[in-house]
Amino acid sequence: MTNLNRSQFQAHPFHLVSPSPWPIYTCIALFNLTTSGVLTMHGFSNAGLYLALAFIAVVSSMSFWWRDVISEGTYLGNHTLAVQKGLNMGVALFIVSEALFFLAIFWAFFHSALSPTVELGAQWPPMGIEAINPFELPLLNTVILLSSGVTVTYAHHSLIQGNRSGTLYGIVATVLLALVFTGFQGVEYTVSSFTISDGAYGSCFYFGTGFHGIHVMIGTAFIAVGLWRVLAYHTTDNHHLGLESSILYWHFVDVVWLFLFVSIYYWGS
């Protein structure tokens, strides 16, 4: 007769995470990053080196933490359907929080644009600001970013259908288009006739487009990790939560850019 210990069995489908050093390590690294960033802005000596080391610490903590998550989901089988549902909900709530962040940026823009104050010359764009032509580089960037949304959707459908080569081609094309978009955004900043210090218009323009650019860089890294996981055979047609999350995030970046193009580049100019 075999005696079974009940403590060896789990009566629920959820994943109880093992003790991990990465949360507290990430907190310390982020605290150092913000502190060193402020010191760098105020011109403290050697603060730049401190900032670089803190950034390396943050990237390291993120990498090790997500390595453990990948191991739990891919090799240990801890990401059951119930866990995947919870993770999907977490990604959706994160994107909602990002949407509210950009809502605050648009609020600041329209607050000044719809009723320009006397200090702005009662006009928008203010006197002396030469707005960027929306039908030149911004329109080209819009086509590039929307094209990347098409290629990443193609990659997703190819993965679901078991078409590995189509998935790889779609993700590679998406990453390349994202890099081209980021490069053109940098070119736009270098040829612009105004800076972030040029009043409310410069602040709103660079705050909105700059933070969108940061989101594009994060999304590019997100999708690139998904590409690596596809190459490493981590994903299947019905279990690819990380790649699916990156695609959802990328579509959010696309939608935000459409709002930016229509409101700040076209209407705001």
Image (tube, grey):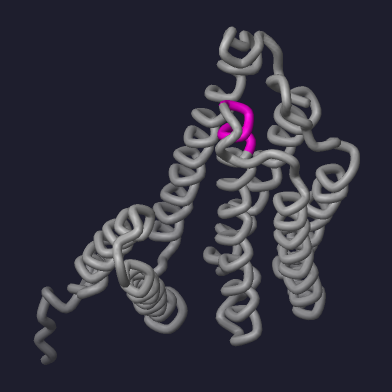
Position in image of residue 31 (x %, y %): 25, 60
Whether residue 58 is visible here, answered yes or no, is: yes
Magenta region includes residue 248: no
227 or 261: nearer the viewer? 261
- Residue 159 screen position, x and y as percent: 71, 70
Q: In this view, does 65 lie above or below 199?
A: below
Q: Main secondary structure of the magenta part?
A: helix
Instruction: Determine the residue located farthest toward the bottom in the rendered image.
Output: 1
- Residue drawn 58% across the image and 9% down it: 117
Q: In this view, does 197 lie to the left or right of 48?
A: right
* Image quarter (top left, top right, bottom left or bottom right) of the C terminus: top right
Q: Quadrant of residue 171?
A: bottom right
Pinpoint residue 162: horizontal percent, then vertical percent: 74, 74
Magenta segment boundaries in residue numbering: 200-205
Q: Is residue 27 left or right of residue 221?
A: left
Q: Is residue 153 at all visible to an observer of this figure?
A: no
- Going 80% across and 69% down the picture, which residue do you hit? 173
Task: Name which residue lies at 56% across and 69% down.
Answer: 239
Left/right placement of residue 175 relative to residue 103 reads: right
